[in-house]
Image: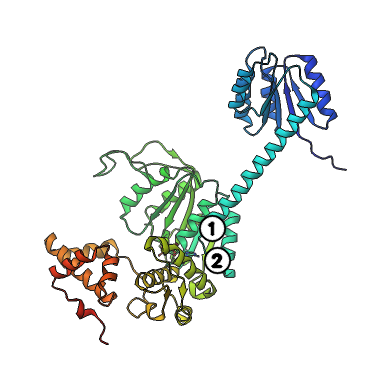
Amino acid sequence: MAAMSSDKILIVDDDRNLLELVKMRLEAANYDVATALKEEDAIEAVKKQVFDLSIIDLQLIHRDGISLMEELHLINPEMSVIILTAHGSIESAVEAMKKGAYNYLTKPFDPRDLLLQIQKALENRKLASEVKRLKGLLEERYSFDNIVAKSDKMKRVLEVVSRIAGTDSTVYILGESGTGKEMIAKAVHLASARKDKEFVAINCVVISETLLESELFGHEKGAFTGAVRTTKGLFTQAHEGTLFLDEIGDMPLSIQPKLLRVLQDRQFYPIGGERPTDVDVRVIVATKKDLEEEVKKGLFREDLYYRIHVIPIHLPPLRERKEDIPHLIEQFLRKFAEPMKKDVKGVTPPAMQKLMLHDWPGNVRELENTIEYAMAMTQKDVIDEDLVLQTKLTSQEPRTISLQEASAMSQEALKPLKEARDAFEKSYLVHLLQLSEGNVSQAAKLAGKYRADFYDLLKKHDLKVDDFKKAK
Ligand SMILES: Nc1ncnc2c1ncn2[C@@H]1O[C@H](COP(=O)(O)OP(=O)(O)OP(=O)(O)O)[C@@H](O)[C@H]1O
Ligand SMILES: [Mg+2]
């Protein structure tokens, strides 16, 4: 029959007789007991075995019991300690408790008191670790709290996330735009032991080759023109944390070998640096394109592909998991309630039907934008069908402007600042009035302006509210 595991107790005292006596008592009470006459023996014992509790004499020969306790706690922080004190010197006993002892007993003590104190200390310890465990569970749940996953497909995704979060393996997230790739990357980070360190994200598309390399790995002063001071890269910033490489498929071929090397050796050379830097970073990558195709076309290194394709997570498009839509809507109504200071209870049945029938090329992000817009516009506590998926906003994925486009635009229309600002202001006002159909209070609210100031703006640009009211 397997023996029940009993609690392990270490007694440290320079009085051999007392040591033997207490050992016998405790063994009679079914504890697993070890003894140490000298401080060094106590330290050795705690290094070798995990004790649940230690009883330490305050007046040892070579050092005081408090400093020994502190040293032992550096090895096993969760071990409970009961202090024995010979002269009833309450002061040092109190000091010991401040520094982490559970309780103290004054010699000579009643053995029954000792047993009682031990029992209490052990119970307290179990309670503390249970509280910690529950807290951990709550935190774990919390990191998934805002993620809607009612469909089987998304449930499976979260299952994989919670199963692999604790490992350091590279995660490869594949999904169309707006499916939640970055959100899942963060969830992996938050559910891992790295959660208190940094989550650093970088998009591999937007920046130039040199800039991307220097962003990732840092550079020494003078490594290239413009490198006026030594800069640490994102790999260093993410040390002991997580680095999220978005749109990995767009990483230039020239940088790929360097990434491969960090993943293999956990080491890299900053640009212009002579000595390698060691890092401990968990890497998560995301992509919209199937990289296997890119590999075939010679646009992505095969060896790197296999290095990053360790734990693949495929995020299904929203049209393949429409049962998530009502829950996502609820989530977004909650999300925007506070910043918009609006309590919208739901969408009307016809609006819901429209939302369910839509194909969602922009996936969850498109749905989120649709709800945000409708919430901003509605004057009721529900969302009507005419506020969702008007042709203007729909079927086209909401876009952000790329750097190239932005600079092309600014070159083409390079006006003096004041003129440009006025032009922008006017078109902004026109847009607001169109959206609100000439409702000034609503338009002013959306613009974050007082009504009076808003009227001043309209006057400045010679805009007439009536022009925007719908013909009855
Ligand atoms: N399952 C979900 N539950 C709740 N919110 C979600 C869910 N999926 C996505 N979102 C929200 O949708 C928005 C888009 O998600 P995210 O930015 O993670 O997508 P993405 O795949 O990285 O998009 P892109 O390809 O455009 O970079 C975010 O605001 C995110 O919080
Ligand atoms: Mg993204």
- Figure disc tally: 2
Occupied quadrant, residue 448: bottom left
Residue at 22% in and 62% down = 407
Q: Tell me if residue 306 comes above or below residue 177 in the rendering.
A: above
Residue at 43% in and 71% down = 367
Give the quarter of the figure containing the N terminus: top right
Q: Is the Cβ of the residue at disc 1 closer than 8 Å to that at disc 2?
A: yes
Left or right of 1 on screen, residue 151:
left
Q: Position of residue 72 (x, y in %)?
A: 63, 26
Outermost residue toward the bottom in this view? 472
Outermost residue toward the front in this view? 452
Residue at 29% in and 70% down = 442
**Which disc number belongs to residue 149?**
2
Occupied quadrant, residue 77: top right
Mark 2 belongs to which amino acid? Ala
Q: Position of residue 276 (x, y in %)?
A: 42, 38
Element type at marker 1? helix
Disc 2 beta carbon < 8 A from ligand 1? yes
